[in-house]
Image: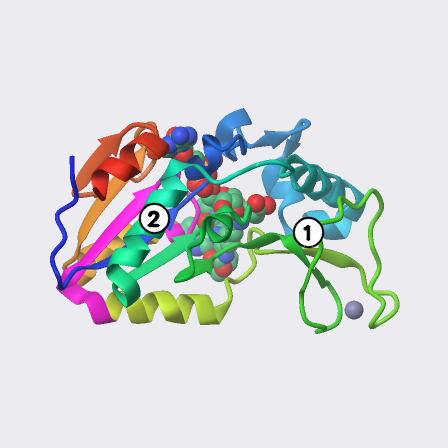
Amino acid sequence: MRIPLDDRSRVLVLTGAGISAESGVPTFRDANGLWEGHDVTRVASPEGFEDDPTLVWRFYAGRRAAMAGVRPNAGHAALVALEARLGDRFLLATQNVDGLHRDAGSTRMVEMHGNLMTTRCATCDRAPFRDTTAHATVPVCTSCHGGLLRPDIVWFGESLDPAVLDRLEQFVTTAGRDLVFVAVGTSGVVYPAAGLVEVTRRVGGTSYLVNLEPPANVASFDHVVLGPSATQLPTLFA
Ligand code: BJW
Ligand code: ZN
């Protein structure tokens, strides 16, 4: 299949863990949402961090270390090529925190759930900073002397950056019926990302799904392509 685009089309691509699977990054719900027997919603929540910051940092330290040598794949590259073709009529919204879209060369992009290699203070408002260290112990803030540092990631129950939500809303509103929404490699259970397909329907746009298997919200899509994204995306946007 090929996604038909004309010179009015505005393409919003939403990606999830599935697009990075072929680069060797494990998806979330692969192991039934478990990590070393812990419920992922516990190690990725403010309550979990409050209860056991050491456990949370162990989870993120492992994920940081696992990124060594990981490279973007043909699916990421296909989105870079599409952006080059469409310019400002393209926006990529990724739920992934792995940074692979940026490594591949995507620039018109929002990271909805933050970035794995960025750290911030849980207490003070110092600017988030790049940090690739796989911390073995909980790092402490040197600005406010005592605040615990945490990954700059949007955990369950936390709000997304309003600037990210504004940019998405602006893109969708401007596009209206010219919106082509393409969701790639995502299980469609985590909001607000999972609701973008309904938003597309409301503005009169067209939606596509590219996923290995049918996700929770499959019935909401106009067109469904089942298969691995690294193989499917280059063909869809050829
Ligand atoms: C392939 C493939 C290949 C494999 N090719 N495909 C409205 C309704 C109900 C609940 C809520 C709601 N609004 C908010 C909520 C609460 C909550 C939520 O959604 N809960 C649901 C679980 C019910 N949302 C929030 O808390 C969000 N905050 C918010 O909305 O604030 C306002 C608010 C708060 C509270 C109440 C109400 C409003 C924040 C969500 C933050 C999510 N963060 C996480 C973890 C941290 C990131 C990290 O550590 O990395 O982000 S959760 C986790 O899931 C991670 C992911 O980005 C996210 C999505 O996962 P994804 O990408 O879909 O991965 P998988 O593994 O689930 O799926 C992979 C898919 O790929 C599968 O389908 C495979 O088949 C496929 N695949 N290989 C193509 N090669
Ligand atoms: Zn601080």
Q: Name the residue: 23% across, 56% down.
A: 200
Q: Name the residue: 13% across, 62% down.
A: 7
The residue at which mark 1 appears reads as 47
Task: Please tell me in which quadrant of the rendered image residue 146 appears.
Answer: bottom right
Which of the pair 137/216 is nearer the observer? 137
| Number of on-image labels | 2
Amino acid, disc 2: Leu
Residue 79: mark in rendering = 2
Could you tell me residue 112's position as x and y percent? 47, 57
> Does the residue at mark 2 contact the one at mark 1 (Cβ under 8 Å)?
no
Q: Name the residue: 31% across, 57% down.
A: 84
On whether residue 16 falls in the magenta region, the answer is no
Is residue 188 visible from the viewing direction of this image? no
Q: Quadrant of the N terminus?
A: top left
Task: Write down the region rendered in magenta.
Answer: 174-193
In the image as oriented, which residue stretches furthest toward the right? 145
Which of the pair 71/156 is nearer the observer? 71
Could you tell me residue 124's position as x and y percent? 75, 72
Amino acid, disc 1: Glu
Task: Please tell me in which quadrant of the rendered image residue 70 appears.
Answer: top right
* Horizontal relation, residue 152 to residue 57: left or right: left
> Any atom of ligand 1 within 8 Å of the CB at mark 1?
no
Is residue 24 visible from the viewing direction of this image? yes
Which of the pair 117/55 is nearer the observer? 117
Image position of 237 with respect to 140: above or below? above
